[in-house]
Image (cartoon, rainbow, N blue to C red):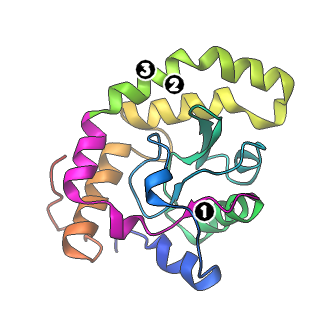
Amino acid sequence: MTLYFDAAAVLFQVHPSCHGRWEDRLWLNVPGPVYGAETDNCATGRLEAPRHVHYGGRYFTEYVYRQPRTPDEVRDLLGAIEADPMDGYAWDGDQRWTPELVREWWRDRERIQEYLRDQMHEWERYDRWIPSQRAAEGALDFAAYIAGGTDAGSLETDLRIYLYWLQERRSPTPADRLPEL
């Protein structure tokens, strides 16, 4: 049994090019292979991948708050990627994130939690305008994921698994010791 699913390899097979630029990624993106960088603000991402995509930042663009861990989750995220008319997603995060950057992102998680709390009124207002988005639900899910877990797991554990992947370039097994954040 392996703990890390290589979503980038699957995405590359199905959709070999990506045009999102690392320098343009939204700071809210969770470390991992896939990220949003200057995506659209047409609110299509949550319709396609509600457990992975949320909206935020200055222009209410899309970002990845949970990396895909199964082929079905990649398929959902691929729907969001293909629906983005700006072609702003990328899946070269494994070549960009370093263990130091992942740890820095994790140390700054309170900033993200504060942002999610401060913007809740915006998500609720948005949901009244377009109820199918469930933006408030997504923000609460992301906050719970950061804080210690949801039914889909814990971000801390997922990031430790991702750190192992970055350092060893293989998935850890249950017997392997995961690096600390």
Rounded to the nearest angstrom, the CA distance separating label 1 from label 2 is: 23 Å
Residue extent of the magenta highlight: 84-107
- Front residue of this view, candidates 59 and 10: 59
Q: Are marks 3 and 2 in contact (CB under 8 Å)?
A: yes
C-alpha gap between disc 3 and disc 2 = 5 Å
Crowd rating for badge 2 (residues with CA inside 10 Å; few <14, some 14–19, many 20+): many
What residue does disc 3 label?
114
> Label 1: how many residues lie within 10 Å, few (<14), some (14-19) or many (20+)?
some
Residue 168's spot in the image, x, y percent? Answer: 20, 74
User: Label 1's element?
Assistant: helix
Mark 1 and mark 3 lie on one chain; the one further toward the N terminus is 1
Q: Can you see residue 75?
A: yes
Q: Is residue 103 rendered magenta in the image?
A: yes
State left or right for residue 60 relative to residue 102.
Answer: right
89 displayed left or right of 102 = right
Label 3: which secondary element: helix
Q: Give the residue drawn at x 18%, y 58%.
A: 178
Q: Amino acid at mark 1?
A: Glu
Query: In 3D space, how far apart are the residues under numbered discs 1 and 3 (Cα atoms)?
Result: 27 Å
Q: Residue at x 44, y 69 (%)?
A: 92
In percent of width and height, residue 118 lies at 52, 15
Judge left or right: residue 122 versus residue 35: right
Residue 179 as seen in the image, left or right of residue 40: left
Q: Quadrant of the N terminus?
A: bottom left
Callout 2: SS:
helix
- Report the residue marked by disc 1: 73
Give residue 116's mark. Answer: 2
- Decide: is 126 above or below 118: below
